[in-house]
Image (cartoon, helix red, strand yellow):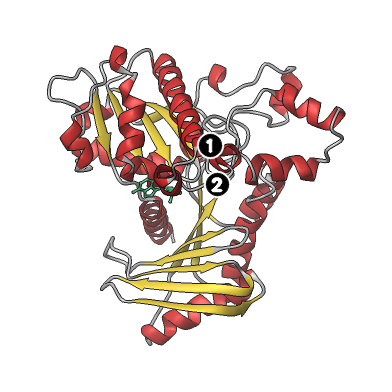
Amino acid sequence: MALNAGSSSLKAALFSLDDDQALANCLVDRIGPNGVFTIKLSDGTRYQIENLNLESHVLAMKAVINQLNEIWKDLDLIAIGHRVVHGGDFYSRSVIVSNEVIKNLESLSPFAPLHQPHNLEGIEIAIQLFPDITQVACFDTAFHRNHPWVNDTFALPRAFYDEGIRRYGFHGLSYQYIANELRIHSPYLCEGKVVVAHLGNGASMCAMQNGRSVASTMGFSALDGLPMGTRCGQLDPGVLLYLLDQRGMTAAEITDLLYKKSGLLGLSEISNDMRTLEQSEADSAKEAIDYFIFRCQREVGAMAAALGGIDALVFCGGIGENSRLVRSRICERLGWMGIEIDYTKNQKNSQIISTDLARTTVMVLPTNEEQVILRDTRSLMALRGATA
Ligand code: AMP
């Protein structure tokens, strides 16, 4: 099982040992008195139960397990791979969970207070319910761990770097998946200079060379870089000082502002959802999209500069995979980088959307973070089996 325990939701994908296609995808949304539990099976069957009283993550997890047990009477869970937002400087790859791993991950909670404690709660619950099976932690930061120092540090006094205040980068499971796909389908491009744009409700870009991360638009937290559904993206730190000093806002108020009320939602005052904004006639919706596009164009330039060139631009994430408008508008002003997209291919969401003669290949590759959790969990189980 691949498990993603968030602040108010729990996502679980169930796999058999020898098949990459998920048998079931479960989502418990709005954990609390009015929880919604959705389960989709590989044959397309879909169940949804609303107004569930799932007051805690433990109850949500039990509901998922009970439902799966109803469907597969002989369900025998042998491993759980957990999505964990922060592996800090400890982990540059997935690891089998041990007491020491949990201690290390707990020490990182202050770095990602909105996500890490919930991810850890997911691990604790899974251990409680299944004490004898392999539990694996897979990190959003791990893929970025070997950045050159200049892409890893802020220009603060060095003691802060030593304390862990660094650019970690996130969405690493998605980038790992894209790097694997490129290695399989376009090994020549994978060896080159590739900018991957993961554009979804959370959004970032990654500069990759030889399938490894060199730079990322996200830094110490998942707030930096591109504007997102409700997160602000890049912000002058002077704004924070102003909000603290002059507006007297508390840390909690600023956290709420930057994580939940900014980005597309804050600018449009309509929605955090790109589809809704594309359909809206309101000027504020158009301006929110304009800002998103402009920042994406800037960051493609920044990522290409970090690489010293660009051979391919890859779009993924809900917006990157589906929004023809966003893709074409981002590419519109990138002709100077050899980027030129083919209108028809873009409309069809083809895998390659650049023109045949364009110097830079532009691709749309659907990402799949769960596959990375699945693969890493399988290989760590095999390793454990081999060393047992
Ligand atoms: P994700 O977080 O990766 O699931 O992506 C969610 C985002 O993708 C939301 O802003 C959606 O509106 C956006 N999205 C999904 N499908 C489309 C589409 N067909 N056109 C535009 N945006 C889309």
For disc 1, the neighbor class at 10 Å (few under 14, some 14 to 19, many from 20) is some
Q: Type of residue at label 2?
A: Ile
Identify the element where label 1 is drawn: helix
Q: The C terminus appears in which quarter of the rendering?
A: bottom left
Residue 92 seen anywhere in this rendered image of the structure: no
What percent of the width, then of the height, locates residue 144?
49, 33
What percent of the width, then of the height, locates residue 353?
21, 33
- Snapshot quadrant of residue 161: top right
- At x 39% / y 18%, what residue is drawn? 304
Label drawn at residue 270: 2
What percent of the width, then of the height, locates residue 130?
54, 74
Which of the two residues, 119 or 349, is positioned nearer the viewer here?
A: 349
Residue position for label 1: 284
- At x 36% / y 27%, what residue is drawn? 330
- At x 61% / y 40%, what residue is drawn? 266
Identify the element where label 2 is drawn: loop
